[in-house]
Image (cartoon, coloured by chain):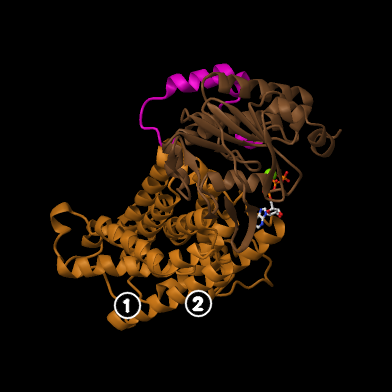
Amino acid sequence: MNKLVFFANKVVISGFAIGSVYAMGAIGVTLVFAILRFAHFAHGDLMTVGAFFAYALTVLFPTAGASLGLPTGFVMLPLAMAMTALFAMALDRLFYRKLRANGVKPVVMVMASIGVALMLQGLVRLFAGTASRSFFIAEHKEIFRIALPIEGITRKLVITEPQILLVVFSVLVVTVLHFFLTRSRFGKAMRAMSDNADLARVSGINTQTVVMMTWVIAGALAAAAGVLLSLDVSLKPDMSFNLLLPIFAAAIVGGVGSPFGAIAGAYMVGFAETLAVFNWSVLLRPLAGWLPAWIEIPVKLAFVPTEYKLTVPFFILVVVLIWRPTGMFRGKVL
Amino acid sequence: MHAGYGGTLILKGVDLQLQQGQIGVIAGPNGAGKSTLLKSIFGLLTVHSGSIQLAGELITNVEPNVLVKRGMAFVPQEKNVFESLSVEENLQMGAYLRRDNYNHLLEKIYADFPPLAIKRKQPAGELSGGQRQMVAIARALMMEPRLILLDEPTAGLSPLFMEEIFAQILGINADGVSVLMVEQNARQALTIADQGFILTAGKNRYTDSGQHLLQNPEVAKSFLGG
Ligand SMILES: Nc1ncnc2c1ncn2[C@@H]1O[C@H](COP(=O)(O)OP(=O)(O)OP(=O)(O)O)[C@@H](O)[C@H]1O
Ligand SMILES: [Mg+2]
């Protein structure tokens, strides 16, 4: 039974946490695709930039969170989200809008976004170097060890405060986004434009405003994902590189352009990663008595070593695309 | 007026005029530039030379969302509904620029187009061709326009639906809305037209009242199938 708690800690809780990070990133990728029709490769870097905004604010006001009883980095989150939203709009204005106005092919937009990604990575290294940092400067990370009220279980359920914030925040974001897209006038205009941009224009919808709103949402969510992940683990200047593939996998697996597909895809990729790197011998060892003698349980038995975790989303991507080329949900429109 | 796509000029000197409250019908062979003409009027293409006026005001190369505010509406020939949005959401998008309460108008539209009332929660993409055309026209009516541009509203419809759409258009016109429509079923359309325009190769060949065009033997021979 203790082993099952270990499993819950390593797979269920971690899977939910990383799945939530991927979900917030994948929603942004999918929204940008639904409205602007190109794959935004600089999305991981929006996350890094967002995380650094929050980090800078945390360094400036290291004790701001104490009065609220929350990590300072989390208290700075709304500000960082707003700053990243503005940053994303600025990127659009500087790079993407001109290309769009010239009616370039989506491939050109993708190439431009790769350029932007490289540029942002360079900028981050220039200002922040390559070292990892912790958001917990003047405070410490709260870790809850919950004893389960079941006899025979001594191992505790371990969950960190950032993980709780992460899951709660992403559920909140997804709910708000759902009501925004299905109930609000502007959200419907976004869906209309993703369905048929020409007709949206004919209906009097200002498509430029919709594009800006898309960047605001995508940027804000990217910042939230970046900050919350960095709170839980650490702020790594190169994190965009490790996030981009799982996020794209999540968006594609779910059906590009479908926000709910992106969420489903994100948790799928998240859980697949934690399941793949889990050391299954821990669960098998208690069964050793029942197994035939010739089977020897190795010390470490994982599908994929942790350092090759990045192959998991890639594998899922390939499998899902063979089985269902449009993704799990019908994609393309919101 | 001269206009086209990018470098290619399609319209080479079109000239037409419609009085307020009238129905104008544009007919002509495939590729004559009929759709191009409507798109140019509605600010979707760049007009290179010439001018367009709405009730005496210049509207050449004015953005569509401005034209919508000025009382113009456009129903394109293809892809004229938001397929993934429900019928009601399609109508709400038609009323996007309205900030007042337009429930009375929704009710009027549902009364005028009964099939839409039944299917109001269904995605427009799941509707039949005739019903989609109704959604498209109803969407354009949500701003209560003074002038509605229709591009082949009966294309691909069965004769029964065609009759119904023509009746709807007459009804819209009776409410005081001017109508400028492109029609493939020219003979039928010209019978309800105050003004008719026969467009060929980017120019209007014949311009006359609908009745006169129908009686003109040359027009009948070349464009109305004898
Ligand atoms: N988006 C476009 N880009 C370039 N050329 C176009 C475009 N759309 C149409 N054309 C060309 O413009 C010309 C006129 O097309 P238009 O659609 O206006 O004809 P139409 O009179 O509406 O014909 P139909 O009866 O088939 O609808 C055609 O030669 C067509 O090939
Ligand atoms: Mg046409």
- Which mark sits nearer the N-terminus, 1 or 2? 1
Q: Secondary structure at mark 2?
A: helix
As rendered, which of A240 and B136 lies closer to the eye?
B136
The outermost residue toward the right is B226
What chain does badge 1 belong to?
Answer: A
Residue drawn at x 36%, y 32% as measured from the top left: B99
Q: Residue A215 appears at what percent x and percent y?
A: 40, 57
Q: Amino acid at mark 1?
A: Ser
Position of residue A297 relative to residue A14, above or below, is below
Q: Secondary structure at mark 1?
A: loop
Q: In the image, A129: left or right of B108?
A: left
Chain A drawing hue: orange
Residue drawn at x 67%, y 71% as measured from the top left: A295
Chain identifier, brown in the render: B
In magenta, the rendered stretch is B96-125
Q: Residue B175 appears at what percent x and percent y?
A: 52, 19
What chain does badge 2 belong to?
Answer: A
Residue at numbered disc 1: A132
Residue B117 makes an appearance in the image:
no
As rendered, which of B170 and B81 lies closer to the eye?
B170
Q: Which mark is residue B113?
A: none
Position of residue B111 relative to residue B219, above or below, is above
Q: Amino acid at mark 2?
A: Glu
Residue at numbered disc 2: A307
Q: In the image, A165: left or right of A108?
A: left
